[in-house]
Structures are given as structure tokens and as C-alpha cells.
Image (cartoon, rainbow, N blue to C red):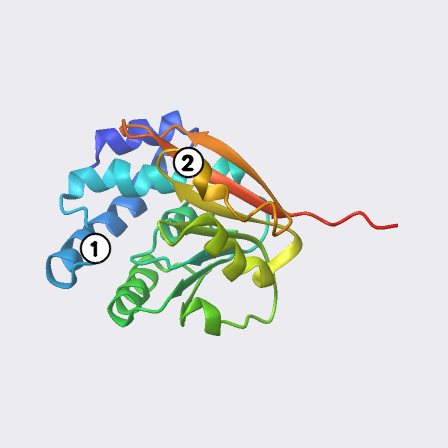
């Protein structure tokens, strides 16, 4: 059964309503596993539509083209919805928790997500062979800690994106000193009244001589 709230939300995000079917299949699998493995604090499947699916997809306009790394993806947020919406984009899901990795593998198997790679590793131990155009996290850590953890993984022109709730100035502490430019981008998530922001961070090249 199709979810009218999801279909309408996709339209408001200028996305194809046909994405509703695979997104709901992912939501339903998450809801089933969540009853046993506690993968998400959001317990009700209906609430997952706005708080997980549409929340993840709201960042799409600010993603540069290229490979995407989702750090501390948990049950695949925002990486799985983004991979479903953009099947031509390579998405790597980095997660250290074994039960969440098992869930992610099941999602990729059932959804046949050929563009998704799962890496079972901690961030500090991850050594990719190629750098990323974009690295994203959702409730992973503070902005400075996130940047210092992922800067080495970014392409020179790449961006780090942190999904946040309210805009908080203290999040930026240490970024300027680290040579990082940052921008707060308000997000409009259909069906979600809570305030949401995307913190976009990019390294700056010092001017010399």
C-alpha cells in the first residue's frame, strides 16, 4: 500500500513519486529489523517517512556530483535513500556496528543496489583507494570533530556535509582555525515541523607569497 505522505513529500522535493515503492520497501525492512535489533530510535513506521526518508532526501540539491561517503550511516541514513534516488551515484556506507552492517547488507541484497558499497570499519581505520567528492553524516559528531575525521578522505574540491537540527554557532568552533569555510543551509523537510539544517564545510587554500 502506497503512503500518500511520502508521495506528496517526493513531489514537494521535486523527486519522482515512483521512488516511493523502493523507499517504502526499505522503510518496512528497517521497521521489522528494528523490533529486534534496535537500529533506530524512531519506532513507528509512519514517523520514519518524514524523519528518515524525506529528511535524508532533502539534502539532494546540495550534493555535488561524484562519489559519496556516508560516515556512521547506522541503518543507512541518509545513504540508502540517496542511493535509491540517484542510482548512478556511487555511495559508500561506512559503519562499525556489526548488526547494522548485517542489516545494510540485507537492504542492498533485497533492493539490488548495485551503486552501494558497505564498509565495516571505524572512520579512523578507513583507508580508501580514492577520495570522495562529498562526505556526509547524520548525527555523527560535532562539526569540528567530523571535519578533522574526514578531511583526509575528501577530494581537494570536495565538501563535508553534516545534517543538523537547529543552527548553533558553537558548532563552528575550531573550523576557521582549521582553514575551513562553512555555510548553514536551512532544509525544508515535508511533513517535519522540527528545524533542520545542513552544515556545508570546505577546506580553503591559504594564499602565500
Foreground residue, 144 or 127? Answer: 144
Foreground residue, 26 or 144? Answer: 144
Residue at (36% x, 57% y) in the render? 73
User: Residue 127: where, in percent of width, then height?
Assistant: 54, 73
Marks 2/1: CA distance? 34 Å
Q: Is residue 45 visible?
A: yes
User: Residue 75: where, in percent of width, then height?
Assistant: 29, 57
Q: Which residue is mark 1?
A: 29
Residue 186 placement, left or right of 154: left
User: Residue 92: where, in percent of width, then height?
Assistant: 46, 61
Residue at (68% x, 47% y) in the render? 204
Q: Quadrant of the N terminus?
A: top left
Residue 15: mark: none
Mark 1: few, some, or many residues within 10 Å (few <14, many ≥20)?
some
Residue at (21% x, 34% y) in the render? 3
Residue 46 location, quadrant:
top left
Image position of 184 with respect to 159: above or below:
above
Residue 54 placement, left or right of 93: left
Foreground residue, 195 or 23? Answer: 195
Q: Is residue 1 visible?
A: no
Name the N-terminal-most of marks 2 and 1: 1
Residue 167 location, quadrant:
top left
Image position of 93 with respect to 134: above or below:
below
User: Residue 47: where, in percent of width, then height?
Assistant: 19, 38
Q: Which residue is mark 2?
A: 168
Viewer-nearest of discs 2 and 1? 2
Mark 2: few, some, or many residues within 10 Å (few <14, many ≥20)?
few
Residue at (50% x, 45% y) in the render? 173
Amino acid at each position: 500500500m502506497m503512503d500518500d505522505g511520502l508521495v506528496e513529500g517526493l513531489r514537494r522535493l521535486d523527486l519522482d513519486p515512483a521512488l516511493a515503492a523502493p523507499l517504502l520497501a526499505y522503510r518496512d525492512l528497517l521497521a521489522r529489523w528494528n523490533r529486534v535489533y534496535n537500529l533506530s530510535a524512531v519506532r513507528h513506521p509512519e514517523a520514519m517517512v518524514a524523519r528518515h526518508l524525506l529528511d535524508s532526501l532533502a539534502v539532494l540539491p546540495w550534493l555535488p556530483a561524484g562519489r559519496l561517503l556516508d560516515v556512521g550511516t547506522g541503518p543507512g541514513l541518509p545513504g540508502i535513500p540517496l542511493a535509491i534516488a540517484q542510482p548512478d551515484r556511487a555511495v559508500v556506507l561506512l559503519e562499525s556496528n556489526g548488526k547494522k552492517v548485517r542489516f545494510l547488507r540485507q537492504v542492498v541484497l533485497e533492493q539490488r543496489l548495485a551503486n552501494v558499497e558497505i564498509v565495516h570499519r571505524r572512520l579512523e581505520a578507513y583507508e580508501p583507494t580514492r577520495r570522495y567528492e562529498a562526505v556526509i553524516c547524520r548525527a555523527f559528531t560535532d562539526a569540528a570533530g567530523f571535519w578533522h575525521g574526514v578531511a583526509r578522505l575528501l577530494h581537494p574540491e570536495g565538501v563535508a556535509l553534516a545534517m543538523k537540527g537547529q543552527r548553533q554557532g558553537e558548532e563552528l568552533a575550531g573550523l576557521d582555525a582549521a582553514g575551513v569555510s562553512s555555510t548553514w543551509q536551512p532544509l525544508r523537510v515535508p511533513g517535519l515541523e522540527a528545524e533542520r539544517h545542513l552544515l556545508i564545510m570546505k577546506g580553503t587554500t591559504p594564499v602565500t607569497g
